[in-house]
Amino acid sequence: MNKRTKRFVAVMITAASVLSSASIAKAEDVTGGGASFPVQFLTPAIAEFNKTYGHNLTYTSTGSGTGKKNFKSGTFKFAGTDSAVGSADLPTFGWTYIPYVAGAIAVAYRLDELGGATLSLSPGTINGIFGGTVEKWNDPSIANDIKTNPTWANQKKKSDVKGATALWENTSTTSAKVTVSMLPATLKSNKGKKIEWYDDTTKKVLKSLTVASKAEVNMTSNVKPTDTFSIKVGGKTIATFKQIKVTLPDKAIQVVYRADTSGTTNNFCQYMKGAVNPDWVINDAFQSCVPGGVTKFGSRFVGQPQNNNQANYIADTNGAIGYAEVAYVTDPTRAAKGIRAANIRNAAGAFMAPTAAGYNSHLAGGVQDSLGLIAFDWKQTTNRTAYPLGAVTYGLCQTSSDAKNKVVAQFFEWMLNDFGPKNAEALGYTPLLGASAAKGAALAKKCGAG
């Protein structure tokens, strides 16, 4: 090696060292935590963000209540919550909300005696179940709801395409809508393949679509109550629907609620109070939301911490019912155990499944205030496409100017503008759109702005 070459190599090594040091200096360790509602969305989002930008963001699922408290104390640099910050948890430093994604809350149940049938539940029946007055699965209120809406059962317990699910909604007595959802990896591996709605009785394809970029798609068709229908992706069956007569069992209902302080609970209680029964109380603790509390119901009511544990308990317990973000219910492992999501009757009288499209329809009727908080309207009597139960989840960030807060701003802007629109539906969530997304991005810019 000549002297000129040696000098060039030395310069390049020095330059590389400077670049490496600069890169390390810019990398930040940022600790956050809180709501478990968005974890199925946040986990892949954080992994991709860290990989793309070289930071080390972490998020601990603690529930919204603990998240708000830890944000106030400074334990978390940023936090997640699905409910407003109460007076006891107001930080003394500058901060802001950032709405960044939404999701339908499923009324999740496992009842093996139904043979895969989808329950249809009215708000009054939901009030009776979670308020403790409807104690058995063969209660007349549940039976009457089923009579109101023809019962179709998915007779295929396990999808042949892992990560692909189908939900059925009746649009009339002779027509239905099927919504097909795919996880990100499933969507990618099946791109270009056909989604088919196949009539097994007549051996005809009623509707077909090609898998493209959307993780949630729907098809509507006329149906005969006597026929059986299979939903296929790439020729493989993900669900088989048949109208059946349901015989409800004389079995006690096991209500499973969130034992920790939870934004999911807060939003469920908001729905109960706003859409059904004004005696419900809005806060993060289910034990205090229920009129009269839950202790009087004894062992029929059981608490579990966080969405993940609550959904696992329901999936493992025949006769159980609870509430959780829909991604926890459509999870392939839990679905194979028999957990299902009920169709809920909205204010216009239609029974709707917990899809992203249905919850987006409901969100469109809400009002967003200057803080970014979205107030829901459960009295949308002309909106037949709205699924009425869900939550918007919010980030909490500090506005003081420091490097970590600027990374938090970058993270939330990226989720709103990039990751969310591309991946939310595939992960079982509803991306914020239009004015709500613009408001969220504007609020994100306040993080670390000083």
Image (cartoon, rainbow, N blue to C red):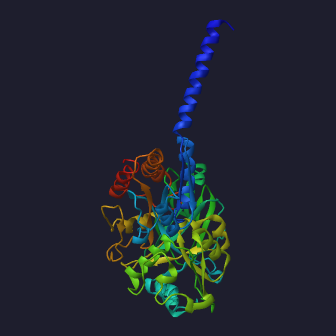
Looking at the image, can residue 218 be seen?
no
Q: Identify the residue at image location x=55%, y=44%.
A: 55
- 165 left or right of 94? right
Viewer-side residue, 436 vs 283 = 283
> As displayed, is residue 142 above or below residue 226?
below
> As displayed, is residue 47 above or below residue 376?
above
Residue 78 rendering spot, x and y as whole percentages = 48, 56
Residue 320 rendering spot, x and y as whole percentages = 61, 81
Determine the residue located farthest toward the right in the rendered image: 1
Q: Identify the residue at image location x=43%, y=71%.
A: 88
Residue 366 rendering spot, x and y as whole percentages = 33, 68
- 406 left or right of 312? left
Viewer-side residue, 72 vs 31 = 72
Give the number of callouts: 0
Looking at the image, can residue 328 be seen?
yes
Residue 162, picture quadrant: bottom right
Q: Identify the residue at image location x=42%, y=84%.
A: 280
Locate the N terminus by quadrant.
Answer: top right
Residue 405 rendering spot, x and y as whole percentages = 45, 49
